Image: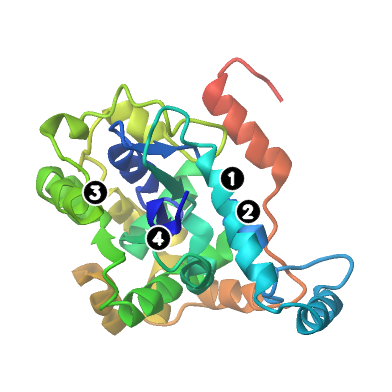
Amino acid sequence: MQDKNLIIIASQPRSGSTMLQALISNNEMVGTVSEPWLLLPFLSYNRQDLIDSVYSQELALIGINEFKKNTQSNKLDHELAKFLLSQYSDVLNNGEEYVLDKTPRYYEILNEIIQYFPNCKIIILKRHPFAVLNSIIKTWNVKTNNDLLQYKRDILNAPFLLQKFAKSNKSNKNVFEMKYEDLVKDPMVITRELYNWLNLPFSENILEYGNNKKYLGFMGDPTGVKKHKSPNESSLNNWKSSISDPYWSNFLKGYHHFLTPEFLMEYGGYSDDEFKQAAPTKMFDEFYERASWPFLRQKIPMLKFIKYRFLKKFNSIKF
């Protein structure tokens, strides 16, 4: 398999990436699996800011870089790319030509992905950050400011990282920037445009992905996809309910001030009258301060995560 046959989707979590995965893989040419996360540990090995290890990632990088200096410095990375492509090729079980890797948190390593796979296709999927925040809160049962800290990078970092990458790759023919809102409002036009960019044959029945099972698995979150079976804009403005929530409306105002109206407009043409008077709030400032503490690492509570996944699949299981 060559890197030109690799398709990547990066986004904030809860941006409609599973729906997009279902659409792109709803044909005989694209193979996929739920959410591989494959590239994160391998391509971030030289990113001390992303890896927190018990053996000291700082010392490990010194050793690895010394090793690379005393050998063929490019060979390690070249062989690593070959190894990863060989793993992807195992997804092509039924004669498919392309592999689709949908892992939202690839927003952390987009530059590394281009470095290792310069000919791959990268799709940047954007959604209104307020809608993403609301979906995180509602879908993952986030009750407090403290609970939200486990998603701090998804909320605080991801929009800026996605926008920076998209902006710096405006002229890159292998990068496709799109919005969730456009997709659900006009799925026929947007999906056809996407398929043309991927050089895939398009037909109207692609929009009906109810029988597509390729993307299903333990990872990912196909709840909305299973419910609607095709792109649907019914939940487009659900996030606005958070404005009337006494607890989260305060957070949203501070979050809007943090993002700035200028960035939201640049990011996706997002402008909301409800927050024209947004200002710093104590609630958001406390969240931001705690998120910045170096010893407060992003931890996904695995028991809660596993419980959520299994309850979705087996409603009768009790924990």
Q: SS of the residue at dot 2?
A: helix
Where residue 291 appears, as percent x and y from the top left, is 63, 73
In this image, 273 relative to 262: left or right?
Answer: left
Secondary structure under badge 4? Answer: loop
**Who is closer to the viewer here, 199 or 72?**
72
Residue ID for mark 1:
87
The numbered mark, 1 or 3, whose residue comes first in the sequence reads 1
What is the quadrant of the C terminus in the image?
top right
Q: Amino acid at mark 2?
A: Phe
| Number of other residues with Cα within 10 Å of mark 4, as a class: few under 14, some 14 to 19, many 20 or more | some
The kind of residue on which mark 4 rests is: Cys
- CA–CA distance between discs 2 and 1? 6 Å
3D distance between C-alphas at marks 1 and 4:
15 Å
User: Which residue, given by chain and number where applicable, does mark 2 sit on?
Assistant: 83
Instruction: Give the class, few, some or many, for how many residues have Cα within 10 Å of label 2's Cα (few <14, many ≥20).
Output: few
Disc 4 or 3, which lies upstream in sequence?
4
> Of marks 2 and 3, which one's residue comes earlier in the chain?
2
Q: CA distance from mark 4 to mark 2?
A: 15 Å
**Rendered residue at 16%/29% (across/down):** 205
**Circles 2, 1 touching at the beta carbon (< 8 Å):** yes
- Asked which secondary structure carries label 3, the reply is loop
- Work out whether mark 4 precedes mark 2 in sequence or the reverse, and give the earlier one: 2
Check the image and report above or below for 313 versus 221.
above
- Give the spatial CA distance, label 4 vs label 3: 30 Å
Q: Earlier in the sequence, mark 1 or mark 4?
A: 1
| Disc sitting over residue 120 in the figure | 4
Label number found at residue 236:
3
Closer to the observer: label 1 or label 3? 1
Q: Amino acid at mark 1?
A: Gln
What is the spatial separation of the Cα atoms under label 1 and label 3, in whole angstroms? 36 Å
Disc 4, disc 3: CB below 8 Å? no
